[in-house]
Image (cartoon, rainbow, N blue to C red):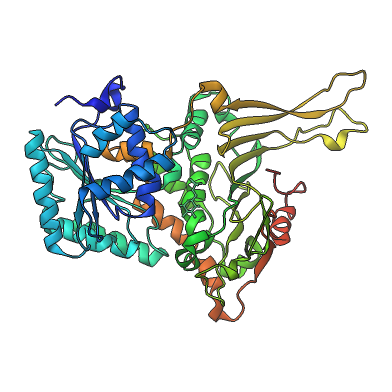
Amino acid sequence: MTNPFRQGSDDSLQVEPCVLVIFGATGDLTHRKLVPALYNLGVDGLLPANFSLVGFARRDQSDEKFRSGLKEGVSKFSRRKPLDEGIWNEFAEHSFFVSSSFDDADGYERLKSKLDEMDQAAGVRCNRVFYLATAPSFFDTIARCLQQAGLLDEDSQGTGAGRKARLIVEKPFGHNLESAKELNTALLQSAAEHQIFRIDHYLGKETVQNLLVFRFSNGIFEPIWNHKYIDHVEISVCESIGVGGRAGYFDTSGIMRDIVQNHAFQLLCLVAMEPPVAFEADAVRDEKAKVLRSIRRIPLDQVKNDVVRARYQTGSVDGERVQGYLAEDGVNPDSTTETYVAMELSLDNWRWAGVPFYVRAGKRLPKRVTEISVHFKNVPHLLFKGENVQSLRPNILSFQIQPDEGISFKISSKPPGPKVRVQQVNMDFSYGTSFGVDAPEAYERLLLDGMRGDATLFTRNDEIEEAWDLLENVFAAWNPDTGHAPPVFGYEAGSWGPAAADELLLKRIPQGWRRL
Ligand code: BG6
């Protein structure tokens, strides 16, 4: 069958025939992110030949009802509007629903028959990709049931010809080091490592990938990318939203687990890693794992100095009055969960010795902005002495991950006029202006890579475990049962966080956090 989704697409992105099965197919992630991403891949002609989608969830509903729910999600959340009815109808015709609880062997038998039937109708043995978009407590059960039903069997070991079967696992991958290890051991009893794709959607963001292209395709930056020229690095993941309807989950997690352990640490890895030997999954992941290993573990009694935690209080965001975290529906009134974290990290390796990395992440900050800024050392000797000398600032290279994707470089310059003065100006690259297109959503790239079997932008287990390991002492120090846990500071919603986070930086960086 010819594939209507593939017209005009790039052959290097060719994907073998594939069926995607989403577990938790009636949930928020499916409607907001996964299916809109698949639809947009369809619009770009990038879906594989014979592509079909199967939703697997507990709710009892017909294929028709499933499709109309997906259509509503795509109409609302797709980056492209309005919906192209032709492409949608083609997509909907290949979407099916299997209703079952996640631990019912019979449900998996029905799924298997459905998939076999689809193969027969298409006349090919399609690859099978199982996307676990459920609560993490089901990951192990689903993998085990899939394996018992023979659905994870492959014709060869991943690389050879024949049918492949893959598991894409959503975050959170564990709650701490021990649970991440347990989950990994459990998954490896059902699937082989090459079949497991652990998602961190930040790696699918265009500007995050551009960070690698920037570093390793431009000869001028790499020679100065080290402790000799770089003073410090800041990584900020700021959001204006609160915990909304996710308070139940968030209160057991906190921003450290929700954002820092995965998204922020992955960004740090990409800034700090050594050039990999190839742009291939294991080569890239080897280098990222090395970065995580080199991050100095903060001693228990040092946590109070190097890590600041806080939660938002009543305030206003975007001109709207909002309530404090403890008043949110679903939050335990005695909660000590943090909605803001700032921390200082040191990397014990040749390249980064002595360069502090500052990471901050928070909810209910003044705006949504994710940025990495690399602050260079100042000039060794000040030539332009005079009244404006105080305004002489070091160069800053910043990567704006969102919302205005781009790269900007702050340099000193002389404003016109008879006096020699020094002022900072920006050299900017903006994604939208340079390429004239919207960046695709992270899930588009990751779903495509998952279907192609390319794990480069997925995290490997050793990275996940290292990232948990380096937070072990932080969680231990924060444990309220110790009786001397550091305070959870308060910050007004709509502010940039607690004063303690500013003080953390001011200890070494006189200009404080970069203004965003
Ligand atoms: C998710 C977190 O992983 O990332 C959310 O669970 C957070 O709490 C979200 O809001 C942020 O993603 P993005 O792509 O909007 O920056």
Give the quarter of the image for residue 378. top right
Image height check: is 6 above or below 291?
above
Residue at point 37%, 48% (across, down): 31
Percent across and percent down for residue 37 are: 37, 39
Image height check: is 115 above or below 280?
below
| Foreground residue among 86 and 386 | 86
Q: Quadrant of the N terminus?
A: top left
Q: Using residue 170 as the reference point, say whether residue 514 is left or right of it.
A: right
Image height check: is 465 above or below 154?
below
Q: Using residue 164 as the reference point, say whether residue 287 is left or right of it.
A: right
Percent across and percent down for residue 196 are: 27, 49
Percent across and percent down for residue 498 are: 70, 60
Q: Using residue 449 as the reference point, say whether residue 441 is left or right of it.
A: right
| Foreground residue among 192 and 365 | 365
Q: Is residue 400 visible?
A: yes
Residue at point 46%, 67% (across, down): 248
Q: How many marks?
A: 0
Image height check: is 407 above or below 512?
above
Give the quarter of the image for residue 27. bottom left
Residue at point 10%, 39% (across, down): 119
Give the quarter of the image for residue 139. bottom left
Q: Using residue 205 as the reference point, say whether residue 132 is left or right of it.
A: left
Q: Is residue 130 visible?
A: no
Q: Quadrant of the C terminus?
A: top right
Percent across and percent down for residue 490 are: 67, 66
